[in-house]
Image: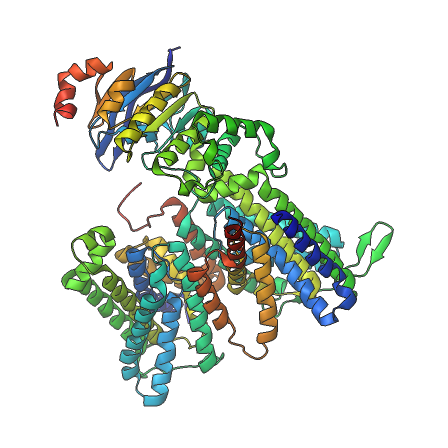
Amino acid sequence: MMTRRFWFLFFLVFLILLSLPLWGSSFYMFLVTEIIALSLFAMSFDLIYGFTGMLSLGHATFFGTGSYIFTLSILHWQSNLWVSLLLAIIGSAIIAWVIGFFAVRARGTNFIVITIIFSLVIFYLSFYYKSITGGDDGLPLKVPDLGLGFLSISIHDNPMANYYLVLAIVSLCYLFYWRLIASPMGRLFLAIKSNEERTQYIGFNTLKYRLISFVISGAFSGLSGALYSMTTHYTNNKLLHWTTSVDVVVWTIVGGAGTLIGPIMGAWIFTFFREFISFHFKQYPIVIGMVLIFFIIFVPQGILGYLLGLIRRERK
Amino acid sequence: MSEYLLETRLLTKRFKGVVAVDRVDFHLMKGKLHAIIGPNGAGKTTFFNLVTGGLSSTEGRIFFQNEEITHLPSHEISKRGVARTFQITSIFRDLTVKGNIWIGALSCKRFVGPFSEASRILDLQSKTEEIMGLLNLQDKQSVVAENLSHGDQRLLEIGIGLSTEPHVLLLDEPTAGMSAEESTRTAERIKKLSEKITILIIEHDMDVVMGIADLITVFDQGRVIAEGSPTEIQENPAVQEVYLGT
Amino acid sequence: MGIEVHLFMNMMNGLVWGLIIALIALGLVLIFGLIKILNISHGEFYMLGAIFGWYLIQYTQNFWLALVLSPLLVAAIGLFIEWGILRPTEDKPIKTLIVTLGISLILQYTVYWFYGGSPQRIVEPFQYHLTLFGSGYSGYRIFVAILSMAVIALLGLFLQKTRIGLWIRAVKQDQEMAIAVGIPTKKVIMITFALGSFLAALGGILAAPIFSVDFLMGLEILPTAFMVVIIGGPGNLMGALGASILIAELEGISSVFVSPTISRVLSLVLMSIVLLKRPEGIFSRARR
C-alpha cells in the first residue's frame, strides 16, 4: 500500500520533470537544470552523512574539483563531452581517496576538522594558482557538442538538450544510489553508522568501507560539479568554498538525512529560496542559519524523516 | 602442534606503568565452557581486549588454532573465528533484531556487493532465521534493537556473535544488570550453547559460574592465580583469600 | 632592506600575531575542554569584537573605551547564546557543532546587514615607532604583544587562584563528579563560554588596527584557530599557547621565502600529521 503510493508519487514527479521543457519558461528550465545537478551533490553527501555517519564539512572540494577538471579538460585538451565527464568522476574519486585515506582514520570531531582543513588547502591552492583556475573571476566555458555515434547534439546553445542530458545522468545516479543502499554494502554502511566498534568486532574492516563510501560520494559530487558547470557555462573557486560545503549540509539536515530523497528536497527548497529572496534580501543566510538551528533542535530527522514517521505512526 | 584452541604465552599489557595483564599463560580447550573469574580490576576485560584485538599487547604472544594472532586488528581476529560480547551491551541500536543478526551473518561472506539486493540473498536470510530461532527471538525480529528489554539486548548481542560462525565465543559478563531470574535463564542458555561451541566467559556471579563451567581460571592483579574445576577452585585457599573471602 | 631585517620583521609580526591567535584559541580550547564541543561560531566572536570596536570608536573617538567595552558586550552575547541556544543540544557534540554553524551564519549576515560588506580600518591609537635593527617598528604592535601576554597571565592566575577558576578546572576533569560535589556546572559552562567570547573579542579589537575590519574576518581566522586546537592538543591550554606562536612563526618565517599561501598550506600539512600521529597534540606529555 505504502510502496504503491510511493511509486505513484515518484512516477508523477518524474512525469512533471520529463514534460517541464514543454510548459516551463526558459528561466525555470535553467533553474531546474541547475537544481537537478545539485541534487546529485545532495544525494552524494547523504551517502556519507546519512548512511555511513560521517559529517564532512569540506564536501565542496569534490564538487569544485569535478567542475574544474571538466572545464579545464575542455579548455586545454578540447576533449569530448563524455571524456570530460568521465575525467571529472575519476579525478574527484582520486582526490577523495587521498583525503579519505587520512580522514577515515579520524572519528567524530576530528573527522570534521580534517575535512575542513583539506578543503581549505584546496581552496587556498585555487587562489594561488589563479592563472590556471581563474580565481574568483572564474573561467568561462564553451560546452562541446554531445556525440552519440552518428548524431551530434549541441548542448551549449540548446537548454532543452542540456536539461534532458542532466536529468538522464542524475536519474541514473539516483538508481545507482537506490540499489547501493538496498545492497549488502549499503546495509553495512548503516551498521557502521550505528556502531562502528561492533562492526569491527564481527569481522569487517570498517576503515576500508568508510573509505569506499567516501570515494563513491566524492566521485559523484565531482560529477555533480561537472554537470553544474555544463549548465552554467562557467566555473569559479566559489564552488570549492566553505559556503558550498555548508549548503549541502543544510539541505541534507533540513530535508532529512539518510533518506536520499530528503536531501534532494532540501536542495530544491533552498535553491528556489535563494533564487527568489537573494535579490530582495541579501542577508538571507540569516534565515538559513535559523532554519538549520530550528531543525537540529526540534526536527532532527528532517522534513522527510518527520513525514515518514507520521505515516509509520498512522499505520500502527 | 598443541591441542588448544586459544593459547597465550606470557601475555602482558602495561598502561603508563600499571600492569593490567601480567605474564599470563592461558589455554582454552576445544569444546569446553571455560570461565574467568576474579575481583574488579583483575585484568579480565583487558585480557579479552588483547585476545580480540581491541588492544595491542606490550609483550607476549597469542595463538588461535595454532596460528599467531598477536597484534592483528580486531576484524582479522573475528574473521578467524573469535566472536565476543561486551560488558556494556554493544549492538546496532537503530537496526531491527533481524538487521542486527543479518549483519553478523554477512561477515561470513567474502564479498560485500554494492548491487545485489540484500533482502534476496537467501542463505543469509535462512542463517538469520536459524539464529533467531535458536535464541527465541523470532517474535521480536522487526523490533528496533534499542526498544528491546535489557535482557533481550544482551541475548541479541550473543546472537550477533553466533551469526559470524565463530569457533569460540567470548562472553564478557553476560548476566550483568540482570535480575536473579533472568540470570538463571541466561546461564541455562549458555550451558546449552556450549554443547555446540567453545565458550570463554567472564562472570561476576559466582553461582552462575559454579553451576555451568567445566573449568575456571582465577585472575588477580593481572595474574592467573589458580585454575581448575569448580570444586577445586572452591577449595583453593589462595582463591578464597582474594576472591571468596571478601 | 636586507633579508635579515625582513626575517626579523616577520618574526616580530609572527610573535604579535601568535599572541592574538592565542587569545582567540584559548577561548576555543577552554570551551572545548569543558563541553567537548568544537565551536564553529567562535571566529564570529573575534569578528564581533572588531565590529563593536569600530562602532564604538565611530561614536566616542576613544580607542581605549572601545577596547574595554567591546569584549564585554561580546561576552554578554556569548552568555546569551550558550544559555538560549546551545544548552538544549549540549549532550550531543555533533548536533551542537551544527548549531554553532547556524549561529555563525546568523552572526555573519546580521553584521553584513548593518555594517555592510566592505572592509573598514581602525587607525592605531598612537603613532609611536621604535627603531629596531635600523628599521621602524610599530609601537602599537609592541603594546598588543605586551597586553596579550598580560591577559594570558591573568587568565592563568584566574584559573589557578579563584573559586570560579577551580570550578572550571573541576568540571573539565569530570563533569559528573563536579555535579556530585555541588558545583553549579551549568553556570560554570555559561561563564566559560562568556569568558571564551570575551577573549576572542579582545583579540578582534586588538587585531583591528593591524588588519582591517569586515564581516568575514571570523571565517578567515577559524582554520588557524582550529589548527591551534589540534596541534596544541584538545583541551590543553599551555599547548594552545605554544601552538599559536608556533603556527604564526612558521607562517611568518616561511613567507619570507615562499608565498603566504604556500606557507599556510605548510602549516595545514603539519597539522594533518599531528592529527594522525599524535591526536593528543605535540605539547602533551602523555605518550600513547
Please determine whether, in this image, residue A124 is positioned above or below residue C141: above
Q: Nearer the viewer, residue A136 or A224?
A: A224
Residue A277 image position (x, y, % from top left): 57, 75
Taking the spot 66% from the left edge, 63% from the top edge, the residue there is A34
Q: Is residue A68 visible?
A: no
Residue C167 visible in the displayed image: yes
> Between residues A126 and B180, which one lies in front from this camera angle?
B180
Picture coordinates of residue B191, whole percent (x, y): 34, 20
Question: What colouring does the structure picture have?
Answer: rainbow
Taking B105 as reference, is A14 left or right?
right
| A23 relative position to B219: left or right | right
User: Residue B199 lies in what quarter of the image?
Assistant: top left
Q: Nearer the viewer, residue C158 or A108?
A: A108
Kindly identify the residue that appears in the image at 49 percent across and 54 percent down: A56
Question: How far from the left and from the top, in percent, is residue C171?
Answer: 23, 56
The vertical placement of A193 against B190, above or below, is below
Q: Nearer the viewer, residue C216 or B32?
A: B32
Residue A35 sits in which quadrant?
bottom right
- Number of marks in the rendered image: 0
> Residue visible at 37% across and 61% down?
C39
Residue shown at 42% from the left, 67% from the top: C103
Residue A252, position as x, y percentages in the image: 53, 57
